[in-house]
Image (tube, rainbow, N blue to C red):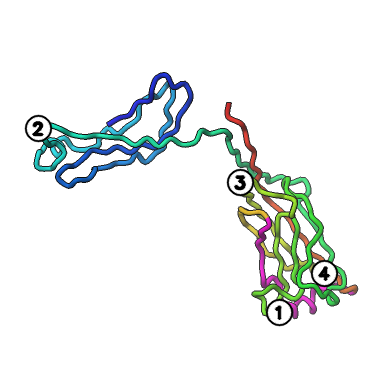
Amino acid sequence: MYVEIDSKITTEVFAELRFFVYNKKENKYFTIQDLEVRRFNALKTVWGLQQFLPLDTFNDLKNGYIFEGGHCEFGVDVIVASPLTNWEILSFDEKLSNPKFSWAVKKLSDLKEHVYTSDSFSMGGRQWVLKMYPKGDSGSDGKWLSFYLFLAAGDTLKADEKVFRQGHIRVLDPLGSNHIELKTNRWVERSNTGWGWDQFLSLAELRKSYLDKKDTLNVEVEFEVVSATKYSTII
């Protein structure tokens, strides 16, 4: 069973095809759907199924496909998809010009607010912010430092757009190289949402080893990969 597009149609058409034949004995349709969306154009006007129903099964009158003296009923549903207007091209930038952002949080022990937000910073063509909970987020039991990485408020994803980011967030050791580092490897699929750790570093360990003499906490974000989405109009 095949379906052919009208030769007068000059534009490309993408369609799903569902073929059926009526079975009077069971009073229902035997149906097979083509699993792929088919592309009809001037070079390919016909699509269908080479093997729909075995002839032996179809021709046997006991099966109900032929009835009332040789009558049979066939059909096809053609579900046309909306025409494509844009190509979406996803690329991954692994050579970021400024892959690091540093944030010095001063007088950490005196902070009273539940959450603090860094200045926005640009990486991979996107604006980001780091959010810190000095007394921990809801899942930390008040004993952990929490960090989350967000797209900045002014950086809005388009419909169905998502961004991949890979990198590290570090709490720097003021006396050496014993930094606390956790890796972030995530797709961002919605604006104004973040991902991170409610238990990044225990507050006891933080006070013991990661504040300098001026009670300053130094945090660093380093990105390795950021994806970018470009849209190209189909002519």
Residue 203, located in which quarter of the rendered image?
Answer: bottom right
48 over 202 or under it: above or below: above
Q: Residue furthest front?
A: 68
Q: Nearer the viewer, mark 4 or mark 2?
A: 2
Q: Nearer the viewer, mark 1 or mark 2?
A: 2
32 over 116 or under it: above or below: above
- Lateral position of residue 90 relative to residue 27, left or right: right
Mark 3 and mark 4 lie on one chain; the one further toward the N terminus is 3
Pointer 2 residue:
69
Specify whether residue 204 is painted magenta: yes
Residue type for callout 3: Ala
Q: Residue furthest right?
A: 214
Q: Position of residue 50 (x, y in %)?
A: 27, 32
Q: Quadrant of the N terminus?
A: top left
Instruction: Identify the magenta region.
Output: 192-213
Label 2, residues with CA under 10 Å away: few <14, some 14-19, many ≥20: few
Residue type for callout 1: Gly
158 or 136, nearer to the observer: 158
Residue in view at x 72 percent, y 47 percent: 124
Q: Nearer the viewer, mark 1 or mark 3?
A: 3
Q: Secondary structure at mark 4?
A: strand
Pointer 3 residue:
159
Pointer 4 residue:
217
Residue in view at x 28 percent, y 34 percent: 75
Q: CA distance from mark 3 to mark 2?
A: 56 Å
- Lateral position of residue 67 relative to residue 217, left or right: left
Specify whether residue 125 is painted magenta: no
